[in-house]
Image (cartoon, coloured by chain):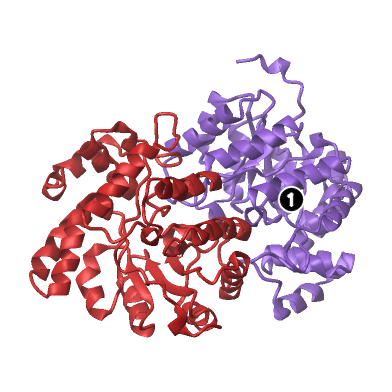
Chain colours: A purple, B red
């Protein structure tokens, strides 16, 4: 094992929006719209881009398409050190292929879902999955951020499993995104593993989380409120205006999560960009129903975003 | 739409074991052992092979490997009309690619999981998923058997959705495997859709199900008891000795399902074939723990299989 001092890579920190993916009417990826939105998020103060996550509908993209998304950003001049792609897959071989691609391209790291078809799998099986992915990638530059979203994946990273992974792979398993929505879990991970880069998936807990030592935030609603969350992070850093910034960010978060989350995010982006492609998720998701859309756009916090 | 009379394809019926997949110590597929087991199942009375299902660990195989499994059987001389591969994937493009491959190879049909990452998706989204798969395959020979396993997939085929799919695609959506373990659901589907080929996933309900008009059985435990289930189906057909054959088949089923199902099936196959490769599932599954193994092999119904 190498000395930790030898690791010259930065650990991700700050605001990393999980970038939504726009589709054309035929459901193919609209790369031009995707690149424009990615650039807008960085312009609005995002520190990096957590592409190919749940909000990105990554699991509704083929493996080839997920690779193309990474390549499109690189070809367009995005700094790979600002990219944190989701590379999880049920099959180890596919998680390896995409993680290797991201790592050799110089991406900051990868967000790794647990394999998500089988339920009730033991921690030992999840440990071996990660060990196989790391061995398969075979690249010291690999940095894994565990992606904890048990309500979707039906499997998750327990505290004891996280401890075992950090102990076994201290230079590789460096962080976690907690999308459980369970603040006690987020808090427990931050407190138990100092130096481990923990990202809550909601900006509504950001001031609490940063005070405990969180790394930042990877939140679906950052797609529509990157500048508001960036302002919140700046206020936390400065120790000034935190309550106001937190309240404003939380108001947006609450409005968006009151509706089906990904369709709501895409409906706001469609309105902002005046581009209907944003409003067409891939099946099995559907566009936001009319009543939900009406409620969403009636919310003052959402109106202020447009 | 073509006249139903023009359809010369047989609808699958009888016993179609979901063939388990053996791995080498490096976790690659042991094709020789897989082909030998596939042949043994047909020799033991299976009517066809439901390859690439849950018991097959299909979702732990890459798309390329799933294609190789189909091709290996065809290259070895298996009749494609006796193959019913699972081709479900979260990404429409991947389900299309594998379903098209199976269909153009002449397979009897495909077993289609719903996309299984997102939870709480509406029936409308699942309908569009199937419609996109059918349009994407673009081959009149495609026959879809819906795969209902909500406890793993976190999404399923409701009765109303099945009705809509049959009404819209009467020549294509021709059957369903019900792995819900909910007999009332299986019964409701059989009774509501006469002529729709319904396969319960457990032989424990087979005599009841066949009396109502089920097509047959696709059961994990058929990997270890194909001849016992074939005998039961023959007894049901003859109307003789049904109770005894049902009791014997149910005893095996109960013994196997008392333990983690796939590892238990593989442990029995490892013992039967004297080949440890059967005992090595891919992560996130792990081999059957020692205590479960002891309980499994102490069961008289299992002892009788070896």
* Residue at the image position 39 percent from the left and 82 percent from the top: B193
Q: Residue furthest right?
A: A43
Secondary structure of the residue carrying tag 1 is loop
Toward the viewer: A218 or B46? B46
Q: Quadrant of residue B287?
A: top left
Q: Quadrant of residue B90?
A: bottom right
For residue A6, say whether it is visible.
yes
User: Please, which chain is the residue tagged with disc 1 on?
Assistant: A
Q: In this figure, which residue is indicated by the disc labeled 1?
A: A18
* Above or below for B151 versus B39: below
For residue A109, say whether it is visible.
no
Location of the C terminus of chain A (image quadrant): bottom right
Direction from residue A169 to residue B13 in the image, left or right: left
Q: Quadrant of residue B288?
A: top left
Circle count: 1
Direction from residue A198 to residue B234 in the image, left or right: left
* Above or below for A250 versus B184: above
Toward the viewer: B302 or A126? B302
* Above or below for B26 versus B213: above
Q: Position of residue A36 (x, y in %)?
A: 88, 54
Q: Position of residue B306 (x, y in %)?
A: 15, 42
* Above or below for A4 versus A229: above
Direction from residue B220 to residue B155 in the image, left or right: right
Q: Position of residue B51 (x, y in %)?
A: 39, 53
Direction from residue B17 to residue B6 in the image, left or right: right
Q: Residues within 10 Å of mark 1 (few under 14, many from 20)?
A: many
* Residue at the image position 76 percent from the left and 33 percent from the top: A105
Q: Position of residue A53 (x, y in %)?
A: 68, 50
Location of the N terminus of chain A (image quadrant): top right
* Residue at the image position 76 percent from the left and 64 percent from the top: A266
């Amino acid at each position: 094992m190498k000395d930790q001092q030898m690791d010259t890579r930065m650990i991700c920190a700050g605001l990393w929006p999980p970038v939504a993916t726009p589709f054309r009417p035929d459901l193919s990826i609209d790369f031009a719209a995707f690149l424009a939105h990615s650039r807008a998020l960085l312009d609005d103060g995002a520190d990096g881009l957590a592409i190919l996550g749940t909000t990105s509908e990554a699991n509704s993209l083929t493996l080839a398409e997920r690779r193309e998304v990474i390549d499109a950003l690189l070809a367009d001049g995005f700094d790979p050190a600002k990219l944190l792609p989701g590379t999880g897959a049920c099959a180890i071989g596919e998680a390896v292929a995409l993680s290797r691609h991201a790592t050799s391209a110089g991406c900051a790291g990868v967000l790794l879902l647990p394999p998500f078809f089988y339920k009730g799998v033991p921690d030992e099986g999840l440990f071996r999955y990660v060990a196989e992915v790391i061995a398969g990638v075979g690249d010291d530059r690999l940095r894994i951020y565990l992606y904890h979203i048990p309500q979707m994946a039906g499997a998750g990273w327990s505290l004891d499993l996280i401890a075992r992974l950090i102990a076994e792979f201290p230079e590789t398993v460096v962080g976690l995104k907690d999308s459980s929505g369970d603040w006690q879990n987020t808090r427990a991970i931050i407190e138990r593993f100092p130096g481990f880069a923990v990202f809550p998936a909601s900006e509504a807990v950001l001031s609490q989380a940063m005070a405990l030592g969180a790394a930042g935030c990877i939140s679906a609603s950052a797609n529509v409120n990157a500048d508001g969350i960036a302002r919140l992070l700046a206020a936390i850093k400065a120790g000034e205006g935190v309550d106001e910034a937190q309240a404003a960010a939380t108001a947006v978060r609450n409005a968006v999560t009151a509706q089906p989350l990904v369709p709501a995010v895409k409906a706001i982006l469609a309105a902002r960009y005046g581009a209907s492609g944003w409003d067409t998720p891939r099946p099995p998701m559907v566009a936001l129903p009319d009543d939900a859309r009406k409620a969403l756009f009636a919310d003052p916090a959402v109106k202020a975003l447009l």
